[in-house]
Image (cartoon, rainbow, N blue to C red):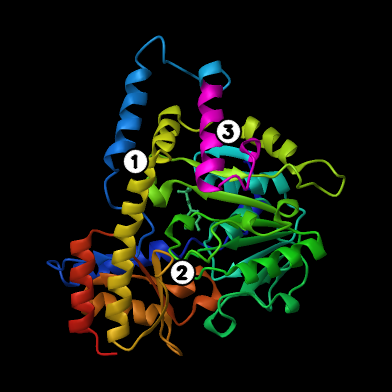
Amino acid sequence: MVQRNKNITKLQAGYLFPEIGRRRRALLEQNPGAKLISLGIGNTTEPLTPHIVTGLKNAAAGLGTLEAYSGYDDDPKGQQLLQDLKAKIAEKLYHGLVSPADVFISDGAKCDCGRLQVLFGGDVSVAVQDPAYPVYVDGSVMAGATGQYNKELGLFDNIVYMSCTPANNFFPDLDSLPPTDLIYFCSPNNPTGAVSTKAQLEKLVDFARRNKSIIIFDAAYAAFIQDEDLPRSIFEIDGSQEVAIEVNSFSKSIGFTGVRLGWTVVPQELTFDDSTPVANDWRRVTGTLFNGASNIAQYGGLAALDEEGLAEMKQTVGYYMENARLIKQALTELSITTYGGTNSPYVWAEFSGRDSWEVFTEILERAHVVTTPGVGFGPSGEGFIRFSAFGHREDVVEATRRLRDKMDW
Ligand code: PLP
């Protein structure tokens, strides 16, 4: 018999979403007619917009012709498409801050987080925001980047949790942190909705430079930033090119969660301790484990970066941001302190001193609204609930009406 991969056996049980599912089913068994509304998911709900759909349709139709057919991206047409998309991302989303040659097209930010873990291997130490999107910790564990398990603390030696709470404005106290090889940092943040300021990111870049760490900056929600003064990319910070990689995605901004398209920026200036460019190894890893993003999706991405496409992106983002505003307003009226939701699609609601699961169950049972308990994203999420703005407007309006009517916080 083959032994299980030891790294996989170290994973904590995938507890959060199965448990939410179990509690949902239990409620439906007790109340068979209940109409549950979910404000708990990160999945997009609104249809793709017309100009982007035309880009996808034309690409699909083109594949049925000899002139436009392309296969793997090493053929000349596939190469041209990749070059065009990289150039347009560098121009329209980074305004020239990054070079097209440093943009690597992918099938999404999550997939690239996984491949980055292959790139760095199991001998690195890692810091993650707490709470955080689960892929950073789970992927690191799968890659073996754990060190020893400390039974007393219930933590792995090589994974440092950077607590991010209202007390520190959701930005870690860097002075108290041990240096690590990698720092996963997500802004706008899932789940807290916090967006780091330029001054905060300058501190982060300075910290990484001093400790010779590499920041893996997840900017999957950058398009949701409304405030012109907030940075949309780590590369807005001077000196970041030597210490940062950025993953990003079309999933949330234009509804490509199912279509699948993203990118990762690995600057040529970023090197390992032997002075070799990280980008060289990244090319090798992606060239081996990944055969390119769908060409249809890439044409969709090109359309999204036309003037019409960018206007549609703004409209899609605006729709979810209005949902976020409605959720935040209802919670504020109920005297709940909220964070996020103004530059991100997540509203992080504080129920100080209470157990996240208990509040989750109370909302589920009384209002028939499904949320996400904050503790599921890490220990510092205890006492918080994540409300997601991804939903149809009528569902969000009805959910907020129920919260107002049924909850007596
Ligand atoms: N990064 C963060 C912070 C996310 O919340 C998500 C999805 O929820 C992703 C990445 C995944 O993005 P993609 O669909 O591009 O894989």
Considering every residue shown, the one lying at the far right of the view is 274
Residue 54 sits in which quadrant?
A: top left
Q: Which residue is found at the position 73% from the left and 41% from the top?
A: 268
Question: Disc 2 designates what residue?
Answer: 193
Considering only vertical position in the picture, is 109 above or below 372? above
Label 1 packing within 10 angstroms: few (<14), some (14-19), many (20+): some
Say which amino acid is labelled 3: Phe
Q: Sequence order check: which comes first, mark 1 or mark 3?
A: 3
Q: Which residues are magenta?
A: 78-102
Which residue has dot 3 on it?
290
- Dot 3: within a 10 Å radius of its alpha carbon, few (fewer than 14), some, or many (20 or more) residues? some
Which residue occupies 69% across, 39% down? 282
Image position of 209 (left or right of 62):
right
Q: Nearer the viewer, mark 2 or mark 1?
A: 1
Amino acid, disc 2: Gly
Label 2, label 1: how far apart the Cα atoms are: 28 Å
Residue nearer the viewer, 396 or 22: 396
Q: Nearer the viewer, residue 257 or 20?
A: 257
Residue 81 drawn at (x, y percent): 50, 26
Q: Which quadrant is home to the C terminus?
A: bottom left
Q: Quadrant of the N terminus?
A: top right
